[in-house]
Image (spheres, coloured by chain):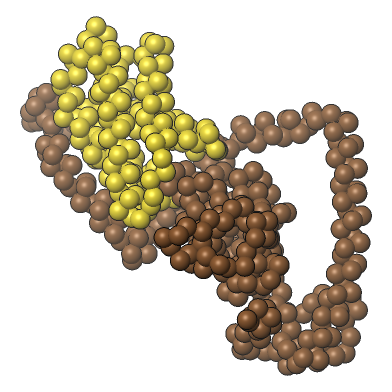
Amino acid sequence: MARHLYNKIEQQQAPAFFVRGPSPFARLAFFSVLSLALMASDSRLQYLASMRQSLQTLLHPLQLLANAPSQLYLSTTEYFSTHDTLLSENQQLKKRDLMQSIALQKLNLLAVENAHMRVLLAAQAALKESSVAAEIMHVGRDPFTRKVLINRGQNHKILPGMAVVDAAGVIGQVTRVYPLSSEVTLITDTSLAMPVQIERNGLRAIAFGHGRDSTVDLPYLPANVDIKRGDRLVTSGIDGVYPAGLAVATVRQIVSAADTPFARIVCEPAGGVENHRQVLVVSRPQLGSINTPSLTQPVKLGLTQATPADKKQSMPNKLAKPSDAHAR
Amino acid sequence: MPVNKLKTLYFSVLLAFVSLLLPWSQVALLVRPDFMLLVLIFWLIRAPNLCNVGTAWMLGLLVDLTAGMVFGQYALAYTVTAFFAVTYQRRLVLFTGMQQLLYVFSLLLISQVMLLIIKTFAGAQFIGWLYFLPSLSGVLLWLLAMGLGLNTGGRGRAK
């Protein structure tokens, strides 16, 4: 029946050689306009975000399939890694564990001391953040931007704006969240700005990604600014996005040209922006209790005073000190 | 026969898509040819009755999605490329192997230049001449496919 119908329609059509539909130019015009409209609506109006999310979820199995060979290779090499390497790695880890646990003991003491001090100063309790471990699935495919995709998303309570760090420092920020994965813009991308502080003297600045090579710039600082080669940049926490005190970059080069009032400061990212697989997604700092076992009465008193509504006020308080110290 | 060919087309597009999804990084990412566009050009040359400018647009949208870019950028670049491919498709019968290679190379370049123009309008910086490496690797891949016996049309080949 269907074949009969098909034959009937087929007979009425012109021979296939002449059937070409609209001219290529008409098609070009139509689809170009459609693309332009899509570009405008996607970049300005944000209507397509939910569509992108659902399509990305549909593609997720295919993505896993494409990742399977490299995963298999990694797990195989891991399985066949020799006894010696495992032993030496184990020893190194033990050594590091020992050193870090010693540091941690001091940290506990300092945290308690800090809490007491804050109560004495009638300041707000420190902000606390939670974190989710994630793994980088693949590097972004757009050559003009620096992004990576990680394997944690909406279902793992990732939100846009969360900071992403590795063992050595900040590597970027979550910019797009899909149900099962999310997109992280690296600190070397031109579109990412990050409030930082020089660790040595508390000077605050904003770091921008350079984009072309994997470095970070500190623009808009005067030529006579007090920055030396080898200075470490840490997050200032002033934005409420990044927890304060995470390593961001190290100053590598300072060029002060005569024709511009600003110094050109090139920094090298501290985190392994392009060579780590395991990362930590850190949530926005929130007011919460410091989980030290030896919390005492005064600290609790400080916490009850601090309500979420005071959260905004807590930032200027927190940052008042470094700027005072730096006033000339 | 057409049904069979259509299946081959879908399969090749799927294969190209999965190769795009492979976890490329660093140098490999820089050199990676645009598999999707190569497959598209092949089918535009070989079977213009099966795919046309609209197909190019759809595939471009798919690539946009995987690249995490604003929708429509690859779509526009592929549309323009497909237009040139379709316009000169009938003349291709007279091309020799070398001429066809040059033709494919210029098509790949057109797509990259289009993308560069769109990106520059959106405020991106030019990332250096290495940006055009995928066109070169794409042509090499085409040459390899021809060497392995893939019938890409053109004089002395299509029989």
Q: Please tell me which residue lies in front, A120 or A10.
A: A120
For this view, does A262 lie left or right of residue A83? left
Above or below — where is B87 with respect to B94? below
Nearer the observer, B127 or A255:
A255
Q: Position of residue B102 (x, y in %)?
A: 27, 21
Q: Nearer the viewer, residue A191 or B71?
A: A191
Write down the quadrant of residue A98 in the picture.
bottom right
Residue A203, image x, y percentages: 63, 72
- Residue A270 placement (x, y as % from top left): 66, 54
Chain identity for the colour brown used in the image: A
Left or right of A267, for residue B13: left
Q: Is residue A296 visible?
A: yes
- Judge whether A184 appears above or below B52 on screen: below
Q: Is residue B7 visible?
A: no
Residue lying at 39% horizontally and 36% vertically, measured from the top left: B129
Up-down relation of residue B33 to residue A107 (above or below): above
User: Going by the picture, which residue comes out furthest to the front?
Assistant: A258
In front here: B18 or A187? Answer: A187
Q: Quadrant of residue B26?
A: top right
Quadrant in which the N terminus of chain B appears: top left
Q: Is residue B30 above or below residue A119?
A: above
Residue drawn at 68 percent across, 60 percent down: A232
Give the residue drawn at x 20%, y 51%: A33
Question: What color was chain B assigned in the picture?
Answer: yellow
Residue A294 locus on image (x, y percent): 91, 79
